[in-house]
Every structure is written in structure tokens, then in C-alpha cells.
Amino acid sequence: MATRDVVGDVTIAAVETPPNEEELGLGLSPSKAALKRARTHRGLKIGFGILLVMAVFAIFAPWLAPYDPYLQNLPMRMLPPVWMEGGSWEYLLGTDHLGRDYLSRLIHGARISMFIGIGAASIGAIIGVTLGLIAGYYGGWIDQGVNFLVTCQLAVPSLLLIMALVFVIGQSVTVVIFVIGATHWVFYLLVVRSATLRLRELDFVAAAQAMGCSKFKIAVREVLPNLSNQIMVIFTLEVAVAILSEATLSFLGLGIPSPLPSWGLMIAEGKAAMFFQPWLVILPGLALFVLVIAINLLGDGVRDVTVTHRRN
Amino acid sequence: MMTYVLRRCLMAILVAFTVSLGTYALFHFATDPAQTIAGEDAPQEMVDEIREQFGFDRPLLVQYGDWLGGVFQGDFGTSYFWKQPVVELIKEHAGVTITLALVSLLVTILIALPLGISAALKPNSWVDRFALSIAVSAQAIPNFWLGLMVIILFAVTFPIFPVSGDATWRHFVLPSLVLGASSVPAVMRLTRTGLLDVLASDYIRTARAKGFMGYRLILQQAMRNALLPIVSVLAVQLGHKLGGSVVTESVFSMNGLGRLAVESIFNSDIPTVQSLILIFVLTFVLLTLAADLINAWLDPRIRMG
């Protein structure tokens, strides 16, 4: 069934790097041990480092970008980057078809990508975690209903559904965030549901029940905190998925509206001149690639250092 | 076994029609089909007349039932935009998509299986690291951008293949590579972990003790069990490719179903959109159903439990 590969992918970490007793930091508290392992995890450090730099650029974009990303300078259009013939130090990465500084647009684009990635992944998390807790904790026909919903969601060609929704509702940053979030919650649900099923049989949940806690309170106060690691890992990987979805949507013309400097939109705009000014297409794509690979490295790393079943 | 098959079939049909009703409702509430047919600046009387003539004033479920009745007789309605039967449109465009999907699945298998197997045979060796880094990069490359890069490289800088279109087999080489690459990470990782799990199991140790070695051990003893999850994931990937090669078809300007779907969304062509989504969902559901049945046949534990 479709769900199997999804779960399989999330739990791969158990086999990917064989546990090393020294590095596991036995005898330390779980969070300290995880930190200790994090310091020796190369992928995690690289991913975190790249992400930190890009986040600084995204947050301080208005101060770090050399120009206004919307400022058109038609006499200076289609300038190549500085290292190519005809490039100038004034526009380090050249200009686009309207003479806008490409470096400034790329820096502001990081902002859009990260904002949409985090926003959409949060909305997906809210939907998926809620449904997963409900399905796992209550079970029975509620669980079957949620399961049916998942099967439907997986069967829909999601890109087409997203495009149809954006077309019908209208193009804007908010709509893109909500629509991507509303179609990317299955991972959260599957992991939270199975973990909840496992956790609700444990003694501390029985203790809370004996003390008269409501089901809602048990789900939120007792079960949810135990899932925070797994949710965090999925969240990270979903941010990457959302960023790629946004870029694809914008490239196809149903995502972020022009003139916002979305990297996907920049590739679409550069495509017309792709054969003569290939950097217009290459640069935003490289930016996307580096951002997404950094997020994935971070997510995989966090999963490697926090997975609990390896310690047990 | 029979009840298992029946239950899965019933579920498949239910899913397909729930999704198609959802799409139908979405477009009917959000757009006015009478206005779409009449054109944007048609007079109000004309729009009303069309609404009555086509029966858009009837309740939603009645209209959906009507359309569904037609579907069972092979009539998917008439496109508002292209003004021809949707069946004809689908027949015209299906060939490109099916060819592209099958060839790119082959590309995926040819890259992902050998990589995954060799990575699993020598965990933590350079082969393993190489395979893993390919998976990590392939997952992070935006697929539409990879398409453009491949065009720049193999159609412009080194003009070996045509830039776009779908006329000859040469037009399919680059799109199939790009679409095939998108599924490599998932299939490769699953092959690797699946095979590692199996190789660590007791029966493989027994087989080794009995003198099974090398490729015979892998292919005859281990792969059969490692194949179970791979069959599922390949079915899912083929489903995505048959219904979702929207991006590849757009980048390479190929007249397949994905591009037809995008154009009909842009033109609010409800009959075409809903027919295509029904077909995509049915294809996906049938493929995963087939994968489940193959798995049940390969593994008695599934069909008994």
C-alpha cells in the first residue's frame, strides 16, 4: 500500500548508520546525549551551517541586499554576472530582463522560500498531528474514517489539486501557504497515529487516566510531548518539500504572483532567455538546490541523533 | 484471499468516487460553468439560457450523478473549452503520457535497483556513500530545473537531442531521464534498507551456512523478500508519473495528459478537469491495488492476516 514507503522512509535512520556505543553517550540525559551526538554528526553540522547563513540573509534581506529587488533599470538589463565577459562589479550576479539586480532578488527570494516553507509545514503539522492523535487515541470507526481520508489524499494527483485550488481561490502568498499545507499532512498523521497507538498502552497514560484526566488532556499533555522529536524531524523535511512545491507552482504560473522575487518565478521569467543568458535560470535553481539540501541534511541529522529506539 | 481482494477493490472504488465528487463540488462552487461556456462578457440572458439548457440549475448531486451515469457508458461529457468530447481529447493525449511514464519507470529501476543493491552489499563503503549522496542530491534538485539544465546541456550546448516536443523517440530521451530521476531516491533508499534488513535475518545466515554465495544468494534468496516494499513503491511512483508528469510535460512541451489537465484548469474546463482527475485517481488506486495483490501473492502473511 502507498503508506508503506512513507513510513519506511521515515524510519530508515535505524539502519543507515550503525550505532556506535561511544558516540551514543550512554549514561547522559537524553537531550545531552543527543547534543553530544549532534556535535560529531557531519551532515547535521553542514546543513545547520548553510541554513544559518541563508536564514541571516533572509531575515536581514532589506539591509544586506545591495539594491531594491523591484527597482527596474532598463538600460542595464540582462547584464551577466561579474565573472563573465561584460559583467560589472556594480551588479555582482547581473540583472534580469527588467534590469533588476539579480543578487538582491535572490536574497529576497530566500525570504519568500523560507517563509512559505515554514508556514506550509506548520499548517500541515497542525492538521496531521491533530488527526493522528485523534485517530490513534480514539481508534475504532474514527480511526477508519481518518484512514480513508489518508487513502484519498494519497490517491489525488497533489500538484494538480494544488493548482486547481490556487486557480479557484486566487494567487497570493497566503493562499499558496494554506493550499500546500492542506495537502501535505499525511507524513505527520502516519507517524503520530502509530506512535499514539503504542504510547496509549503505556503505564503513564494509565496513571493519568486513573487520576481522572480527560482524553483531550491526556492526548495533549501526556502523549504529544513524547512525539516532539519525530514531529520535528518530519517538520524539517516537510519544509523542504513545501519549498520545492512553491517553486514548482510559481514556475508553472500558479504560485507566487509577479513581481515578487520567488525563485521558481525567477526561473520561469528567465526561461525565455535561457539559451542566451543561462545564468538567469541556473542561479535561482542553484539557490533552491542548496537551501533544500541543507534542510534535508539538517532533518536527517536530527533524526539520526534523536531516534530513541536505538538507545533502548 | 477472496475477501481480501474484494475488500481492497471496494475500498479502491470508494476512494476514486469520493475524490472525483470532491473535485466536482470544488469547481462547481468556485466557478460558474454557464459563464465559462458563454464567454466572459456574454449578456446575462444568454448565460441564464445556457444554465437552463445544460441543467446547471439542478442540485449538485443530481448533476454529478448524471455525469457519472455517462462515464459508465464511456461518455465523459463535452469539453467547454475545446468543444469536443473529452474521450477524444484523452485518447489524443494519453499515448505521450503512457510512453513517458513507462520509459521513465524503466530509467528509475535501472538506476535505483543496482545502486541500492550495491549499497546494501557493502554498507558504509564508498559505493554506499556515493549512492546515498546521489539520493540526497536528487531529492533536493527541483525537477523542472533539472529539465531546463538537461535541455541547456544536451539540446543546446551539445545538440544531441531535440529541445522539446513529442514527435519521435528521440524527443522522449531527455524527459524520461528527468522524470525517472525524480523517483530514484525513494526507490534506492527502500531497496537498500529492505535488502539490509533481509540480509541480517536468520534464514539468510542459514542459506550462507549451507553454501549459498554471492549473486545467487542475493538474487534467489534475499531479493524475493526485499522486493515486497519495492513493488509497492514502484506502483506508487508509476501512479504519480501517469497522473503527475505535469511538470516534465510542461518543461519539454509535450502534449500529454498532464499538460491537458493544466490547460483545462486555466480555462475552467470542468468536464475535462474532472474526467482527468477521475482517471488519474482510478489509475493510481488500481496500481496500488495491483501492488497489494502482488505482495499478497509473494507473502502469505499478508493474505492470511
Image (cartoon, coloured by chain):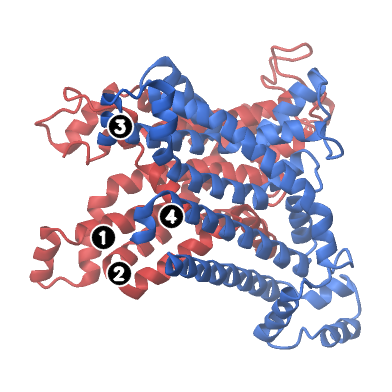
Chain colours: A red, B blue
Tags 4 and 3 in contact by the CB under 8 Å rule?
Answer: no
- Which residue does the image show at 77% across and 11% down from the upper left? A85
Q: Amino acid at mark 4?
A: Ala
| Coordinates of residue A191 in the picture (x, y in percent) | 35, 52
Q: Disc 4 marks which residue? A: B296
Rounded to the nearest angstrom, the CA distance separating label 1 from label 4 is 25 Å
Q: Chain of mark 3?
A: B
Please tell me whether mark 2 or mark 3 is closer to you in this view. Answer: 3
Identify the image quadrant of residue B104. Answer: top right
Q: Chain of mark 2?
A: A
Q: Callout 2: few (<14), some (14-19), or many (20+) C-alpha neighbours within 10 Å?
A: some
Q: Callout 1: few (<14), some (14-19), or many (20+) C-alpha neighbours within 10 Å?
A: some
User: In front here: B138 or A278?
Assistant: B138
Q: Disc 3 marks which residue? A: B204
- Which residue does the image show at 23% across and 33% down from the upper left? A34
Instruction: Check chain identity for marks 2 and 3: say if they share one.
Output: no
User: In front here: A164 or B164?
Assistant: B164
Q: Which mark is residue A139?
A: 2
Q: Disc 1 marks which residue? A: A197
Identify the image quadrant of residue A300. Answer: top left
Rounded to the nearest angstrom, the CA distance separating label 2 from label 3 is 38 Å
Rounded to the nearest angstrom, the CA distance separating label 4 from label 2 is 25 Å
Q: Callout 3: few (<14), some (14-19), or many (20+) C-alpha neighbours within 10 Å?
A: some
Q: Would residue A70 be seen by someone viewing this image from the given angle?
A: no
Please tell me whether mark 1 or mark 4 is closer to you in this view. Answer: 4
Q: Amino acid at mark 3?
A: Ile
Please tell me whether mark 3 or mark 1 is closer to you in this view. Answer: 3
Local SS, label 1: helix
- Which residue does the image show at 13% across and 69% down from the upper left? A209
Local SS, label 3: helix
Residue B10 lies left or right of residue B67; in this view the side is left
